[in-house]
Every structure is written in C-alpha cells, then in structure tokens.
Image (tube, coloured by chain):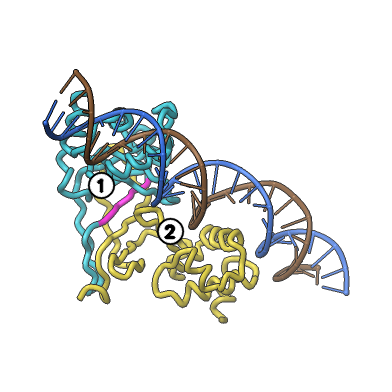
Chain colours: A yellow, B cyan, C blue, D brown
Amino acid sequence: MKEVFAILEAHNLSRTPCRMEMIKVLQEANSAVSEQLIKEKLGNSFDRTTIYRTLKSFSSQDVIHSITLEGGEVRYALTPLKQRRINHDHIHFHCSGCNNVFCIPEPKIQMPELPSGFLAKNFDLLIEGLCKTCNT
Amino acid sequence: MKEVFAILEAHNLSRTPCRMEMIKVLQEANSAVSEQLIKEKLGNSFDRTTIYRTLKSFSSQDVIHSITLEGGEVRYALTPLKQRRINHDHIHFHCSGCNNVFCIPEPKIQMPELPSGFLAKNFDLLIEGLCKTCNT
DNA sequence: ATACAAATGCAACAATGTTGCAAAATTACG
DNA sequence: CGTAATTTTGCAACATTGTTGCATTTGTAT
C-alpha cells in the first residue's frame, strides 16, 4: 500500500480510490491485464470512462504501458520502476496456452538492418508461443 | 487483371466484384491499407459487412495479412506470393511521418533467447520510425 | 475550513467486430 | 445454355472499445 502511494506521488497523480485500486490490481497480476479484467476485479464499482481515463493517465505518465495483441485486444502492465522515463523497448510474450502476456525485459534485441533510408526509432516485438507453465 | 483472377483462383475464391476490386486496391497501394481506405477507394459501393467478410476470407486464405498498430488500428497488405502458405514472419515498418506501413521482407530476424521454459512459435515485429521519403 | 483544480459519472456518439437471415450472384452440371 | 446448389451480399442488430462534453463530486493546497 505504501508502494501504491509512492507510485502515485512519483508521477504526480492524486490519490483517488479508482487509481489506488487499479494499481493494486496491476500489481497483483503476474501478467498484463485487459481493461475488462480490471473492471471485473474492481467489481464494477467505477464507471467505464473513469477506468479508461485512468489508463490514459497512467500510460502518459509511464506508470503502465499497453500491449496491443494481434486482433486488437489491449493489455496493460505496470512499467518496472527502472524503465520508467527511459524506454519501453522490451519484448512481450503472448502464451497461446493460457492467454497471458508477459513482459520479457531481457535480452535487448538488436535492431535488424533496414533497407537504406529507413530510420528506426523504436520497436515492438510480440512473440507468440508457450510459456513456462504451458510448455509441457 | 489477369493476376487478380489468378490470385482468386489460386485460393479458391469466386470472382465477385467486391473481391476483384479489393485486390486491385491492395495491389495499387504501395503500403498496407486500412479498412476505411479500402472503403473509400471502393467508393462506398459495397456494404461494410461485405468488406469485413472479404478481409476475413482473404486473411484465412493467406491472400493478405493484417498488421495491428499500437493503438489498435489494423492495416492490410497483400502477402507476397512466395510467402503464401509458408510463413508470415516478416518485419513491418510504421512511418511516423507519412503514417504508411511497409512490409520489410528482409532480413529475417533471429529470435532472441527467452527465459528458460518459454517456447517461441512466431513473432511480430513492428518498427516505428521514418521511411526513406520522410527521413530527410 | 475553504477555494480551486482535478477526477468522476453519465450521456452520447463513432468505429469496429460479429452474427443471422433473406435476397442476389456465382459456379457446377446436365 | 439454363437450372439447381452453393456462396456471397446487404441489411439489421448488437457488443465492445475509443472518445468527448458537461455537471457534480472529490482531493489538495492554503
């Protein structure tokens, strides 16, 4: 709980019930969560718009980052403290078994060489496969 | 036009006006196109649902593949003949200048090493930056 | 404790994904 | 070439998500 306060304070976000509970949900998840799951975990006690706007605040303040899966479903995950305000370039792994999405901080991938003239700024790598648990 | 017929035939798709015109639109685009752009190019002569279902048919037959951008917007591009029925693993490049999305067939990237237990099946790499034209 | 700023709930609308069903078009076949 | 069987299309309908405006409520600084 102290950490929830710390996160909000570090990012200049006021302590509102919705924000605090959402951070708790994100903390307790061991993988990236969908907006729908957040709503369920919160017991529908907050308006859809509020959750939507809170996710936007969190994103723009680098508290969380979003992962868009093929098909368009979006998941959200807390951004590890170390990466906040630095870069978001890390790998995401979508398990086709349990449907969870995990952040894989290492290794950094090397940017492939692009055709001449193309200038890369950042990337998004989504790997699909089986996670530790589902890979039996 | 002959090629349009060939594509449809090769994938067991009947020759309907909507399909033929959609393939032409995809051929003429030098980058991946959105559903909305397709609709515009077609002059709103086909129902939304028809275009939606045609995109699904094309996708499931590997005539096209879709690219989901951060933010959830989806673009569609013809799958090069050589890659049909083989694999879809290639890089996509989203230019933040002109907003176009390009398929980059080479190089193949090497799958990064994942934490032990994770088994990768395929990936999706979306690079963001400036294309040849916008990179002045 | 109060005043100002920010967050929330609600209404509303757009875009997209998706399905069922009847009408129309395409293909296969005699 | 014409007809029947199969597919595709258009339309209606509904769900989900993204997004904004506005009035009300809440949080924060003084």
The residue singled out by tag 2 in the image is A74
The residue singled out by tag 1 in the image is B60
Residue at 25% x, 73% y: name it: A134
- Judged left or right of residue B124, residue C5 is right
> A67 or B49, which lies in front?
B49
Q: Is residue B127 magenta?
A: yes
The N terminus of chain B: image quadrant: top left
Asked if residue A21 shows in the view, the reply is: yes
Over which residues does the magenta segment extend?
A: B123-128
User: Percent x, y for residue A106?
Assistant: 30, 67
Q: Quadrant of residue A100?
A: bottom left
**Rendered position, A70 above or below A29:** above
User: Percent x, y for residue B63?
Assistant: 23, 40
Q: Are marks 1 and 2 in contact (CB under 8 Å)?
A: no
Residue at 43% x, 38% y: name it: B48
SS type, badge 1? helix
Q: Are marks 1 and 2 on the same chain?
A: no
Number of other residues with Cα within 10 Å of mark 1, as a class: few under 14, some 14 to 19, many 20 or more: few
SS type, badge 2? strand
Q: Point out the frontmost of discs 1 and 2.
A: 1
Amino acid carrying mark 2 in the image = Val
> A107 or D20, which lies in front?
D20
